Amino acid sequence: MKRLANRQILFVLILLLIHPIVRGQDYLVTTSSDTLRGEIRPLMFGAEKKVQIRTAEGKEIYSILQTRFFVLDGVSYFPVRGPQGYTFMQLVKQGYLSLYRFQPENSNVFTGTFLRKADGTGIELPNIGFKKQMTEFLADCEDVVARIESGALKKSDIDAIIDGYNACISRRTQGVREDIQVRVEAKSALTLWNELETAIEKEGDFEERETALEMVADIRNRVSRGERVPNFILQGLKNAVNNRPALSEPLSKALASLEQ
């Protein structure tokens, strides 16, 4: 019995030691990017929401405008402008379109559902007029809108709606990035072909000078339109400037730009 009692006492002591460690995982990040670790207590009453944090140095209170987010018992809370103004909401699902839970008016339970895009626009998950409001809110993704309108996606499918919308935005963003990359590469290539043209003009008169300039102009136009340059044109340009050592380096750089 004595051994059992000792084990129970040891277990209680371990719990007491673990408790502050677990609580120590709670933290708050201010709008000035300071991270404070301690005991978190949200103050959700009143018009302006606040959060209290108790650290080794004492107790401090931060307004919602001073708080970037805080983590309490493993749940992240962010300031979000909802139906009743700014309040702390629980982050449930994160993405370009994120899902939050909030406390409805006159409630201390996080039962409200709020959708917020990264651009700051948001909407409370509608109970009435779900199809109309959601298709308007997600109008920039035709595939998801079509599935909502057809009834394939309902209010109960909110996770699938969010995943589908975020995937749609991700594809669109990737397409924009690729388009920008192509334009950057094309601009870089055009610069090198302009430099080759300038080098040919500075080289003075030689037998294939005009032919070389015409070919460079043709290649530059094709590059600007994103077209492939036929090998016979590239070979013709090489032959035209083959015996001009000063053109070797700018020609090599211009040709290399087509391989990127």
Image (spheres, rainbow, N blue to C red):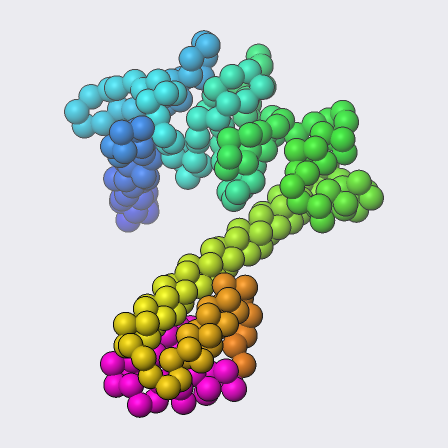
Extreme-right residue of the structure: 150
The residue at 63%/26% (across/down) is 124
Q: Is residue 199 left or right of residue 228?
A: left
129 to 232, vertically: above or below: above
Image coordinates of residue 232 in percent, x first then y, are 52, 86
Magenta range: 231-260
Nearest to the observer: residue 145 or residue 260: 260
Image coordinates of residue 217 in percent, x first then y, are 46, 70
Image coordinates of residue 158 in percent, x first then y, are 67, 40
Would you say residue 239 sits in the magenta stretch?
yes
224 to 53, vertically: above or below: below
141 to 243, vertically: above or below: above
The residue at 32%/72% (across/down) is 201
Q: In this view, does 54 lie to the left or right of 169?
A: left
Would you say residue 16 sits in the magenta stretch?
no
Residue 259 in view (yes/no): no
The residue at 51%/35% (across/down) is 119
Image coordinates of residue 252 in percent, x first then y, are 33, 80
Nearest to the observer: residue 191 or residue 77: 191
Magenta residues, dominant SS class: helix
The image quadrant of residue 77 is: top left
